[in-house]
Every structure is written in C-alpha cells, then in structure tokens.
Image (cartoon, rainbow, N blue to C red):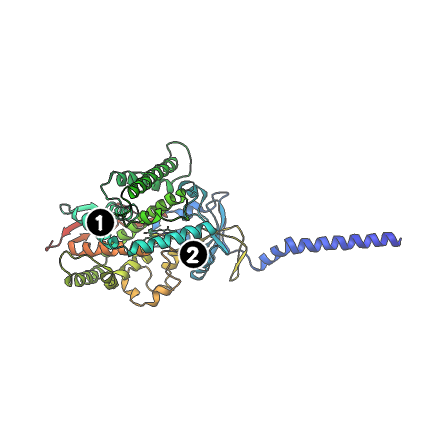
C-alpha cells in the first residue's frame, strides 16, 4: 500500500509538473499575449489578405483610402495580412524609428521572395547579417572615394547641360523620360565610366528597363512573362558588366596602370573582400538604387515647383546669385553646392510630400513588445514612411508643398523624416541623389520656364508614376 501510495504521489507530482511545464512553455505566452495583444485589425481574405487594398493606387502625396480607413478604425499601428504573411503595419513615427534602429537585432530586412529571384543572392538590397555588413562597408568606402575625385561634380553637371541642350528646339516633352536619361547617364558614368552614346550604355539601359518592369510584375517564371524577361535581362546585364570588368583589367595591364580612370569600377576592381559575383551584383545595386529613385525625385521637384511660383522664384534667385560670381563657363564646385540652401529645402520638401519610397519590408526576429502591443516573431512588419511624412501632428499643413518649413534646422533631426530609410540600411546614395537634382535645377531654372498639366500628378502604385509622364511645356528664357 505504502508502495502504491508512493507511486501515486510520483505520478501526481509528475502530472502536476507536466501540466505546470505546459502552462509555462505554451499557455503562459498565450496568456501574456492576452495582456499584450497583437495590434487590432483584420486579416481579410484567405491567402491574399488585404494586399490588393493596400496596393491600390492613390496620389503619392496622400495616405490613400486603405491607410486612412485602417488608421482611423484601428489606430496608427494595426495588424493585417499582406504579401502572403501576417503583418503589423506601422504609421507611427516612434515605432518606425524603433524598427529601423533595431535592424539585425529585433527586425530584419525581408523583401518578398520573387524580388530575391530577380536581384540575386549577392544583392545588398536583400542581403542580411554579416554579408550585408561586408557589402555595405565596401559601398560606403567606394562612395566616399568616388565623391572625392575631381571629375565627380563635373561629370554630373556636364550630363545635365547636355540634356538641357538637347531641348533647344523643343517646346513640349515628357519629363520622366528626360529625367531617367539624366540619372541613368550619370550613374553609368560614375559607376562604369561609360559615355551616354557608348553601345554598352545603350545595351544596359535596354536590359535595365526590362529588368525594372519585372520587379513590379507578377512573379511567374513562365517564358514571355515580364518576370521571366526580367530574370533573363539581369543575366544579360551581368554578362555585359563582366565583359566591362574583363576589358578594364586587360587595359590596365596593357597600359601598366598609368592612366587609371577615376570611376567606381576602378576602385571596385581593387577590393579583395568581394567575389566576382558580388562585384557584378554591386554594380547592379548601384544602377538600380541610383536610377529610378533619383529621376523620380527630380520629376517631383519639377512638378511641385510648377504649382508653386513663389518657391520657384526664390530658387531661381538663389541659383542666379551663385552664377553671378562665376565666369560664364565656370563649373560648379562643392562650395557652390553648399550655398544652395533653399534648393536643399525644396528637395527635402519634395521627398516629404512626394514619398518616393512609401514603405520598406521587415520581419520580426523575435516577439517584440512595443507600447501595449506584441509584434509576434516571424510576422512581417511594414514601417510606412509616407504616413509619418503626411501626419499633420508632425508636419504643420502637411498636405501642402511648403519648402520654407525646412528653414527650421531641427526638422532634419526628427524621426518624422525618413525618405532614405534609417539605421544600418540607410540609403548610401542620398547625397549623390541630392547633388544630381540640385545641379540639374541650377541649369534648368536659368534656361527655361515651364508649365505642366493640373492633373499630371505622382501616383503611388505603390511604386510612384506620373499619369502622363509629366508633360512639360517649355519656353526658353530670353538670355539663352
Ligand atoms: C531620391 C533618391 C533615393 C531614394 C528616395 C532612396 C531611398 C532608399 C531607401 C528608403 C533605402 C532603404 C531601403 C530599406 O531600408 O530596405 C535605400 C537603400 C539603398 N539605396 Fe537608395 N535611395 C535613393 C538614391 C540612391 C542612389 C543614388 C543610390 C546609389 C548610388 C542608392 C543606392 C541604395 C542602396 C545600395 C541601398 C541599400 C542599402 C542597404 O541595404 O544597406 N540609392 N534607398
């Protein structure tokens, strides 16, 4: 009896221990999740969730119906089901900042799988952890070296002048095409040292356009689909870039490296910490990162200025005063760039108001508690920058284009302005983009007057496009 009592006790203790373990391991987190629930919201349809509503086009200087509706119903942080995953959407300044600052610790960059298929596994845009760190360090040092080279600014200015020169006998054009030509020619020259009329530039541009179309297409790898064409275009660009690398190596040996060029590629060739594939990916990342976004920024500035005569007048005065102390053919330098203060305000305002990058993709690496919410491990997390940029409690008269707001310096330090992202993935090309836009504007405002259509405005698809490509009606200024 004593024996059976003993075994009964053992069993009871055993069962109690098991139940306790079960509670601690499984039920307690559920219990805790009840105290810190996931944010409110709905998952929508099975599988697709609310993705279609989230992606529905709207003017890029507005929140769009989906975010307006969800924020007013559930608050600035809500749950949804997007891109095939349970998701926390954040339109909250503090949470967005927290997500960007905790990259690699609590959150990680997580673009949809088909994007990886097109960009390739060595792309910095999708790499994480140590690989990302290594690629990024090389990118930052390459950019610093490139910027310090004497031809850096001159090449950008020459490209701007040549585009404007080609408009001499035109009174109407589609500006998005011209802006793309400009930023593509700049980036190809900076990275590969190629001139606009070089056959390799033309080949890369053609493949690149196919590549870009695939990035925003349905990810079906069936011959003939934009996605399949993009994957093939990528491999052709890789072959062209590899051929350029080989040619450059051969030439350097033949010329005994006496007449070294001063582009990105020359420096990249000397980097030992990257494999050949990584070097090619690197070139592709620079073209991808530096082409469409910068041309969009330029297009937005030109569009917003056409609706804001007082800002245009002030900008023009700034550039004229820079020109008056220079000889006619003198080129712009860093000192001149530093004097373009109002231009910087216009650029910042276009970035805030126009929202080139509406949101970025992240996922939670562990259960994260933020305020009263739980962001469960493995869920997708989308910090929406546009919602913060257009929040009237953070930017007064947020739905107006008002460059003067940036005259108050503290605006720049705020967490409420993140057009280039933040933290350890912050855009390495932000300054290049701004210099390109500032230099183009310097010559544009002194050469032409322009007019646009009232309704030719930027639309977020969510990738931003202008309805009719921004048609410009041009009039040359008297002295040109
Ligand atoms: C107006 C122009 C631009 C905008 C609005 C922009 C925006 C951004 C944003 C928001 C990110 C962060 C993405 C993320 O966190 O997932 C980013 C990253 C990046 N951008 Fe830009 N960008 C611009 C111009 C450029 C230029 C000119 C270059 C190239 C020279 C460039 C190259 C890159 C690269 C390589 C990354 C990845 C950085 C990393 O993951 O560490 N971007 N950009």
Q: Is residue 251 left or right of residue 371?
A: left
The answer to whether residue 62 is above or below residue 198 is below
Mark 1–mark 2 distance (CA, rounded to whole Å):
32 Å
Residue 194 percent across, percent down from the top left:
26, 44
Q: Please give the residue where the numbered disc 1 appears in the rendered image.
A: 159
The answer to whether one can see residue 63 in this image is no
Residue 396 percent across, percent down from the top left:
34, 65
Front-lying residue, 444 or 263? 263
What residue appears at the point 81 percent right and 55 percent down from the top-left corner?
9
Residue 381 percent across, percent down from the top left:
47, 52
- How dense is the environment of label 1, judged by Cα within 10 Å: few (below 14), some, or many (20 and up)? many
Front-lying residue, 465 or 362? 362
The reply to whether the residue tagged 1 has its Cβ within 8 angstroms of ligand 1 is: no
Q: Determine which quarter of the picture holds residue 409.
A: bottom left
Q: Please give the residue where the numbered disc 2 appears in the rendered image.
A: 424
- Helix, strand or loop at label 1? It is helix
What residue appears at the point 27 percent right and 61 percent down from the top-left corner?
344
Residue 94 percent across, percent down from the top left:
44, 62
Q: Earlier in the sequence, mark 1 or mark 2?
A: 1
The total number of labels drawn is: 2
């Amino acid at each position: 009896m004593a024996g059976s009592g003993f075994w009964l006790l053992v069993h009871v203790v055993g069962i109690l221990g098991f139940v306790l373990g079960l509670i601690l391991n499984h039920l307690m987190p559920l219990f805790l999740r009840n105290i810190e629930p996931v944010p409110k919201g709905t998952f929508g349809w099975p599988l697709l969730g609310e993705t279609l509503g989230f992606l529905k086009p709207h003017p890029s200087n507005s929140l769009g119906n989906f975010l307006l509706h969800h924020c007013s119903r559930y608050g600035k942080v809500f749950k949804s089901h997007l891109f095939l995953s349970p998701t926390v959407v954040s339109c909250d300044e503090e949470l967005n900042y927290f997500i960007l600052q905790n990259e690699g610790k609590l959150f990680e960059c997580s673009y949809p799988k088909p994007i990886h298929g097109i960009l390739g596994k060595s792309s910095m845009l999708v790499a994480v952890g140590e690989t990302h760190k290594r690629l990024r360090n090389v990118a930052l040092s390459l950019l610093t070296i490139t910027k310090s080279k004497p031809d850096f600014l001159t090449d950008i200015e020459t490209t701007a002048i040549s585009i404007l020169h080609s408009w001499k006998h035109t009174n109407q054009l589609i500006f998005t095409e011209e802006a793309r030509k400009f930023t593509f020619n700049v980036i190809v020259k900076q990275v590969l040292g190629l001139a606009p009329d070089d056959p390799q530039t033309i080949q890369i541009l053609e493949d690149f356009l196919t590549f870009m179309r695939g990035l925003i297409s349905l990810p079906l790898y069936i011959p003939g689909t934009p996605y399949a064409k993009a994957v093939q275009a990528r491999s052709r660009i890789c072959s062209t870039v590899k051929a350029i690398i080989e040619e450059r190596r051969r030439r350097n040996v033949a010329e005994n490296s006496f007449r070294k060029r001063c582009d990105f590629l020359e420096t990249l060739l000397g980097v030992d910490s990257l494999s050949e594939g990584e070097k090619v990916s690197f070139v592709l990342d620079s073209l991808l990162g530096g082409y469409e976004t910068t041309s969009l920024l330029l297009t937005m500035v030109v569009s917003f200025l056409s609706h804001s005569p007082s800002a245009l007048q002030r900008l023009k005065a700034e550039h004229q005063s820079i020109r008056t102390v220079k000889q006619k053919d003198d080129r712009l330098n860093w000192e001149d760039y530093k004097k373009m203060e109002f231009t910087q305000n216009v650029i910042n305002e276009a970035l805030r108001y126009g929202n080139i990058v509406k949101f970025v993709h992240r996922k939670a690496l562990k259960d994260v508690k933020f305020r009263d919410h739980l962001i469960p491990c493995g869920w997708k997390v989308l910090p929406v920058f546009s919602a913060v940029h257009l929040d009237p409690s953070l930017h007064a008269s947020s739905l107006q284009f008002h460059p003067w707001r940036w005259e108050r310096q503290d605006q720049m330090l705020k967490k409420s302005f993140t057009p280039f992202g933040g933290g350890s993935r912050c855009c390495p090309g932000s300054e290049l983009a701004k210099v390109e836009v500032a230099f183009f504007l310097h010559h544009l405002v002194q050469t032409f007057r322009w007019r646009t259509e009232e309704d030719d405005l930027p639309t977020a698809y969510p990738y931003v496009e202008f309805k009719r490509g921004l048609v410009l009606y041009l009039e040359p200024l008297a002295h040109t």
